[in-house]
Each structure stands twice: as structure tokens, then as C-alpha cells.
Amino acid sequence: MANRKRQFEVTQDSVRLFLTDVLSALKQLEPRSVQVCATSPPFYLLRSYGTKTDWPDGWRGELGHEEHPNDFIRHLLFVFDEVWRVLRDDGCLWVNLADTFNNKQGKKGTTNAPNGSNGRFDAGGKRYAQSLRQQPEFFKHFIPGIPHKSELGVPFRFHLAMSDIAFRKFIGAPEGPIWTCRRTVIWSKSLVRLETQRGEGTAMPEPTLDRPSRNYEFLFLFSKKPQYRFDRTLIDVPARKSYKPGDKANAGSVWETEIHADTEPGPQGIWRINQEASRYPHVAIWPRSLVRQMLLPTTQEGDVVLDPFAGSGTTGEVALNMGLKTILIESSEIAQKALLDRIARSTEKALFS
């Protein structure tokens, strides 16, 4: 496997860190040793983390840089086949994915973007612009057979490949486990009140003028079996109309996150963080409130939570703060620096007591 020279494991009582490629690390984990896997893989054709892996189908390259989105989905299946092996039978898997567009001009010449590429990049702030300008030529990749400016449907392809044996075969994946998709959650980064046309939230501005901006991402909940551990009452909200005080109602499957400082807890101990508000150069950090919402109904104290694409360590930080154990896997050297620093800073008792 790639990155073998950097392969090592840091073990503490509550956290295990694998700083190597995802397939090598997963193969070292014991079967049925994890209660929940919560992760956000690299999105297709949107980032470059400078890593390459030797995949079982013979391709060598960085996840998310494949020639076709079906190839990307096939490589994700290789990863989540291993996750199936290490997951307990009553465990579950949360996967965050978003889509991208096919574009003959490439990502650096976004159609109808004011001021060309500068308009697109500068929308996210100076640090975001600088990080994107460092990305290599893969941004110019165009996929024949899919119309120019069309969404690629990556999240939908992934949903089908995970839960439909026929689609798994269609994309050339070998036989493997078929997951039960229990829910597709919409992670809403902002909301627009149609009556007043006022926007609320933290979605990244998109300068492209010929489509609505994307203010959401998908969050898929999978299980190995129809019956698994999930206590919905732990995330239900107070009922707006009820005959009895204290009644709660279904929280639903559209979840919003809000802007708060990077280190301050929100109300009721819920951590909220703007995905761009971070001291680290890793540009794809998901909010702690989102991770906590996933782990509340699916874990109990002492359970093990796995993140095979750990990034800067948000999943690990939240898990440790909730009294859980965590296994974090990350191959990118840029993300590894943030991961080690963040876990050490935010959970010193868990790591070094």
C-alpha cells in the first residue's frame, strides 16, 4: 500500500491514531470492534490532499481523482466493505457526501462566475481562496458522456452502490456486503425564509448566477441489519403542540448548524462551529454539533467510534468529550498535523491522564 514509509499507530486508552492509508489501517482492526463509523470522505474532484493509494482494482491514485465518478464510488465500496467487517452487528455507519459539476472549463474557470476564478475563490475568504489556488490540474478534469454543467449525482450513485446489488455490479465492484440505508439526512448550512427573502446560516457563497447556490450536504445513515441501536428520543425536540408538558416530537431529518466561536460551547452543551472557523488549513471541517447529533442516538458510554477519513479530528474530539473511545485514520500529512494538534489541545485528559 502507498504511504508505507509513514505507517505508524499511536495508541492511548481512549484513542487510536493510524497515520497511513485507509485500507491498510482498516485491515489492522479487529472484526466487530466498532459501534459507530462516522466519516466524511474526500468529495469527488473538489480537493487534493497529496496522497495516493494502491486500490484492489489495480488503480493507483488519490481518492476523489478518478476518471469517472463510478470509479470513485467503487473505491469507496472497498473502504466501507472493510468498515462492515469491523462494525458490530447492531452498529451503524454515517457518511457525509456532496455533489460536484461536470465543467469543460474546469473548476478554475467557473461558468458565469463574476470576476472569473477570483470571484469563485474569494467568496470563501482569504484562507479558502489561498488553499484552492494551490490545487493541481485535476480541477480541469471533464467527464465525456455527462453534459457540461451537469451535476454528477455522486451521492445518489453512492447510495445505490451501498444498498443495491445490481448497481454494485454495474460499476464493476466485486461481491460484497449490501447495506440498509435507514435515512438520508439533509445537513442544511443555511435557510432562506421565502416570505421575507432573508437568508440565515453559514453556507459558502457561490457566485455562479445560473443556478441556486448549494446550501446543504447529504448525510447517509446505514446499518448492517434492519434492527440496530438507535434511540431517537435522545435527539427529539420539545413538541410545539402537546397536551402534556415535556412532550417531545420527531426532530426530523433536516439538520441545521449555526455560527459560533471555534472553542465555545453552545446552549445545552451542544458544540456548534462554522465549518470555516478553524485555526487549521484543512478546508473541509464538519461541525461538532453535527457529529454529536449522529453519536447521541447511536452510542453508549465506552463505545468505540471510527472515522476512516479523520481529517482534523472533529469526530475524535466529539467522541472523547462524550465518554467514547475513538479510532482515527488519516493519510494526508497536512491533515495529520491538524489532527495531532487538535486532539492534544482539546482532550488532554483523555490522551495523557
Image: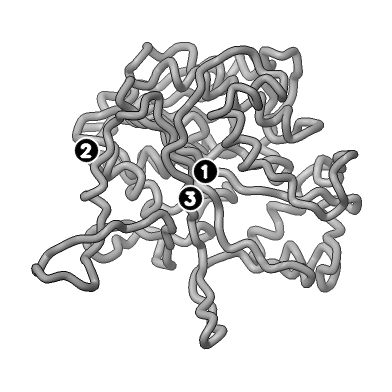
Q: Is residue 249 visible?
A: yes
What's the image's color scheme?
A: one colour
- Mark sitting earlier along the chain (2/1): 1
How far apart, in angstroms, are the residues tagged by discs 2 and 1?
Answer: 23 Å
User: In the image, 170: left or right of 275?
Assistant: right
Query: How many residues crowd around disc 1 within 10 Å: few (fewer than 14), some, or many (20 or more)?
Result: many
Q: Residues within 10 Å of mark 3 (few under 14, many from 20)?
A: many
Q: Secondary structure at mark 2?
A: loop
Instruction: Please indicate whether residue 180 sits to the left or right of residue 269 in the image.
Output: right
The earlier-in-sequence mark between 2 and 3 is 3
Q: Mark 2 to mark 3: distance in Å? A: 20 Å
Instruction: Pinpoint residue 219: horizontal percent, then vertical percent.
Output: 49, 46
Residue 34 lies, with reference to residue 46, above or below; the image says above
Please identify the quadrant where the C terminus is shown: top left
Which residue is under mark 1? 96
Q: Position of residue 294 (x, y in %)?
A: 36, 45
Quadrant housing residue 258: bottom left
State the image quarter where residue 6 is shown.
top right
Q: In the picture shown, does residue 52 fall above or below 240?
A: above
**Mark 2 highlights which residue?**
323
